[in-house]
Image: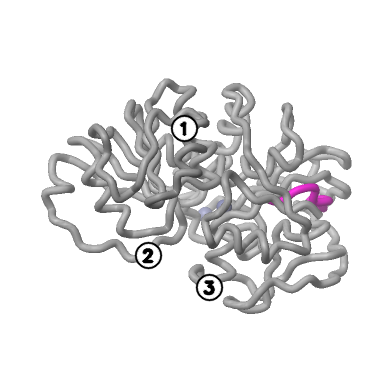
Amino acid sequence: MRAMVLDAPGRPLLLRDLDRPHPAADQVLIQVRACGVCRTDLHVVDGELTEPKLPIVPGHEIVGTVVETGSSATRFRPGDRVGVPWLGWTCGECTFCRKGAENLCERARFTGYQIDGGYADFTLADARYCFPIAGPYSDVEAAPLLCAGLIGYRALRMAGDAARLGIYGFGAAAHIVAQVAAWEGRRVFAFTRAGDTDAQAFARSLGAVWAGSSEEPAPEPLDAALIFAPAGPLVPAALRAVDKGGVVVCAGIHMSDIPSFPYRILWEERAVRSVANLTRRDAEEFLALAPRVPVRTHTRPFPLAEANTALGFLRSGQLQGAAVLVP
Ligand SMILES: [Zn+2]
Ligand SMILES: [Zn+2]
């Protein structure tokens, strides 16, 4: 089978011919139909996430068809369409797993990071961490739901009942979250790079009531802000934009350093927090919600062998919506 492989951080992925793997007892073998390209993949390739298995096949927004099941992976049958997210395995025993925070598991393993992922014709996944993908979505349309959607949804929940919601960085996650937030009756304010009028128009088309530069002040105080761009200076900018008691949620797995800021912009019970990974419950909730909104994903498909090109589009921020590899 073909796979795009990272041998070492900082190098381009290489197209290789690998043996098709066989599922262990808990696993299913999946024929990959589509795999989203996530900003996190870029952090793995660029070496900003420092604990990958190497070599690694990236990709954690996998939609595919089960072709073979392990002896105890009875949840699925050959032919089922499934999705595989970032959370690939948890221990079930640590303090965090036992209190329902498996996203923080001490021994968690992640798809496309410690477990070979979906930049390939086939992949293995632990059946307990896969989800049925029903509904109206094509394989390509469904792929970005598996991370951009799930992490975005978890971040949105961290904003509580914020009626005025700022979104900083309008990429794959934001384009999904904006639709859910608008559907929930929130007013969405989209902050993009200065001068990125295409992204601002895109945000308005998805329900944002205002879109402008992240260097501008917000047009009115916000109740919460979600930061999807990996840029630390956005944290004090968002703190300045939120009202008393507001929360700033950092939704990415990596961010450049946050510059120091005066205490007065945190004062009055403003809060800054991060969102890490996902739980299976997040996935079940969001995958049930998405077709009800209905969330529509904007995708740009790339052939599997052009994974490096797709990553380049993400790096330059030139993409509206999500890049998806199609084997
Ligand atoms: Zn655990
Ligand atoms: Zn991701």
Q: In this view, does 234 lie to the left or right of 254?
A: left
Disc on res. 204: 1
Q: How crowded is mark 3: few (under 14 residues within 10 Å), some or many (20 or more)?
A: some
Question: Is 103 included in the stretch rendered in magenta?
Answer: no
In depth, the one of 256 and 108 nearer the eye is 256
First along the sequence among labels 2 and 3: 3
In this rendering, is residue 294 above or below 218? above
Question: Is 31 included in the stretch rendered in magenta?
Answer: yes
In depth, the one of 312 and 59 nearer the eye is 312
- Residue ID at (25%, 63%): 259
Residue on which the image places disc 2? 256
- Residue ID at (11%, 49%): 264
Q: For the residue labelled by badge 1, is the local secondary structure a helix, a strand or a loop?
A: helix
Task: Tell me, yes or no, whether the two marked residues, 1 and 3, touch with CB atoms within 8 Å.
Answer: no
Q: Which amino acid does label 1 sit on?
A: Arg
- Residue ID at (21%, 42%): 270
First along the sequence among labels 1 and 2: 1
